[in-house]
Image (cartoon, grey):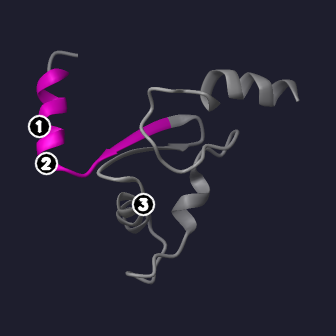
């Protein structure tokens, strides 16, 4: 119970993170990568990303373990992000 509470306080309640699949303790959003895409009939990470772009939009986030990842699937949005954070 204490481990779950610590995880939730550190990772489970991030409000500035983009929408995406639910984040579970220690496995993150790993379960979404194993969903079989109806379009591609496969379960690779890239196909899961395509499927989740349809669900959550062109910007979404997910976790692998405790490591956050953000997917930007739009050239213009990506260009703006790179301009804004060029020096970081």
Residue 27 is left or right of residue 48, and the answer is right
Q: Which mark is residue 79?
A: 1
Q: Secondary structure at mark 1?
A: helix
Pair 2/3: label in front: 3
Dot 1 crowding, Cα within 10 Å, few <14, some 14–19, many 20+: few
Name the residue at 52% across, 35% down.
67
Residue at the outermost right position: 1
Location of residue 9 in the rendering, given as x and y in whole percent from the top left corner: 68, 21
Dot 3 crowding, Cα within 10 Å, few <14, some 14–19, many 20+: few
Location of residue 49 in the rendering, given as x and y in whole percent from the top left corner: 39, 59
Dot 2 crowding, Cα within 10 Å, few <14, some 14–19, many 20+: few
Residue 10 is left or right of residue 1, and the answer is left
Location of mark 2 (residue) = 75
Q: Which residues are magenta?
A: 68-85
Q: CA distance from mark 2 to mark 1?
A: 6 Å
From this view, report whether residue 79 is shown above or below residue 11. below
Location of residue 70 in the rendering, given as x and y in whole percent from the top left corner: 37, 40
């Amino acid at each position: 119970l204490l481990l779950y509470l610590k995880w939730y306080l550190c990772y489970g309640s991030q409000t500035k993170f983009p929408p995406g699949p639910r984040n579970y303790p220690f496995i993150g959003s790993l379960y979404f990568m194993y969903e079989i895409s109806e379009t591609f009939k496969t379960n690779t990470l890239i196909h899961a990303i395509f499927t989740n772009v349809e669900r959550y939009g062109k910007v979404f986030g997910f976790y692998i373990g405790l490591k956050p990842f953000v997917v930007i699937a739009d050239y213009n949005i990506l260009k703006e992000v790179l301009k804004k954070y060029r020096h970081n």
